[in-house]
Amino acid sequence: MSFPEGFLWGGATAANQCEGAYNEGGRGLANVDITPHGKNRFPVMLGLDNTLEFYEGEYYPAKVGIDMYHHFKEDIALFGEMGFKVYRMSIAWSRIFPNGDEEIPNEEGLKFYEDLFKECHKYGIEPLVTITHFDCPIHLIKKYGGWKNRKLVGFYENLCRVLFTRYKGLVKYWLTFNEINMILHLPFMGAGLLIENKETEMKDKYQAIHHELVASALATKIAHEIDPNNMVGCMLAAGNTYPNTCNPKDVWKALEKDREGYFFIDVQARGYYPNYALKKMEREDNMPVMEDEDLELLKNNTVDFVSFSYYSSRLTSADPEINKTTAGNVFASLKNPHLKASEWGWQIDPLGLRITLNSIYDRYQKPLFIVENGLGAKDVIEDDGSINDDYRIEYIREHIKAMHDAIEIDGVELLGYTTWGCIDLVSASTGEMSKRYGFIYVDRDDEGNGTLKRSKKKSFHWYKRVIETNGEDLDNLSF
Ligand code: BG6
């Protein structure tokens, strides 16, 4: 079993979950900073808390993250040791434009990422840069109301122009918005939206979505103008929805669920709003305001590749009574009796990855990139300091096999694979550190205690071997 030559093996992180240094280097505050750990996390991510300040007595894990801001050389050296071909990371918008609406960028922020990219190239690692991974400068939320305001398109355009110009020759792969479909589920996190009025909630969300779609097309256009070598991708929180039974009503429900996510990529990859979405927005009176040139811009600036995160498939029923029992994750899903689940209830379905890869490829016929996949689990440090994370190895191995089948048997074009949280970091949904995804352990707990010391888990050595053999040796556990 081997992968295409030049297959991009690597790992992924996001600024808000690992960088820390929230008030250093001229950085401004962002929505992600004021999102606490604990029971108040969800209300904030949902946009139900409009204070936009830190509360006394709350713990805010993004403030320090895993302090990658000060450790990036050490961390990238470890990625280099594993043989990464690509490292997916994100830019903290407020590090470049502290308020978001300035005209002149913050040189210290620009220099930080320049050094980071140079460090990657030292080890032959290609950076894959997410321009926004759930972050939005607080000032843009306070003054303009986040992405529902058209002005954000212009501020984002400014950010992109600066990034593409400054990092020309250093970065080739870009993603415009992480999990763009998250706006529908966690609007404060996805688009800096506060839900102040339930009646206009959906209208605001669709307006914000339209602005992000226009901004994404604009970014693609500018990226290509500045450097024709740039490759720009969209990013979906993916995972096919299965119908609970063969009752056609369940099948229809599953199709509708999948369309909630595909809708975004239909626009970004095909260049126009699909009819089913136009009809829905019209029917529900949520049609966003569009400017004359928007549709032309979307049409002429489709993405070069489609990227997505995949953790699990989903299961749905047309019967609202049955659907009441959905497991409480961001993407509600019924319990699939054929699948095992992680400690956090995320169901494990490697074949679902092959199904998802095929569905997306059939739909768009563009190269794909799996930019997140992995297992969040609690790790135990043995007396000798070792961490034997065989469960993580098994999860990733089975998903790699599924991905191989999709390439080899089904002919799906896949550019690469970056596992999520290649180094332990703060969980986006729960704010915990104990939900670990990494090949590299970071000594920090859910309350912010720990030395931040990095150490290699068993999976570190295993993944190194996988990359060395271009996916041929998945079974070697003798280190
Ligand atoms: C994706 C996000 O939704 O899933 C990441 O892009 C996130 O930011 C990842 O960390 C895993 O989710 P969690 O909640 O386990 O961190």
Image: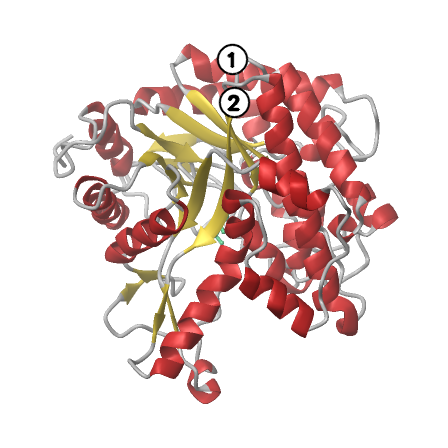
Please report whichever mark, 2 or 1, sits nearer to the chain's N-terminal start: 1
SS category of the residue bearing label 1: helix
Q: Identity of the amino acid at label 2?
A: Asn
As drawn, the label of residue 118 is: 1
Q: Residue 287 occupies which quadrant of the picture? A: bottom right
Q: Is residue 384 in view from this perspective?
A: no
72 relative to 320, above or below: above
Q: Nearer the viewer, mark 2 or mark 1?
A: 2
Residue 268, image x and y in percent?
55, 44
Residue 436, image x and y in percent?
41, 47
SS category of the residue bearing label 2: loop
Residue 108 appears left or right of 351 = right
159 relative to 237, above or below: above
Label 2 and label 1: CA atoms lie apart by 17 Å
Residue 92, image x and y in percent?
65, 33
Residue in the image at 43% along x and 48% along y:
309
Residue 248, image x and y in percent?
35, 81
Q: Nearer the viewer, residue 388 or 213?
A: 213
Q: Identity of the amino acid at label 1?
A: Lys
Q: Nearer the viewer, residue 5 or 398?
A: 5
Q: Residue 400 occupies which quadrant of the picture? A: top left
Disc 2: CA contacts within 10 A as few (<14), some (14-19) or many (>=20): many
As drawn, the label of residue 230 is: 2
Q: Nearer the viewer, residue 410 or 300?
A: 300
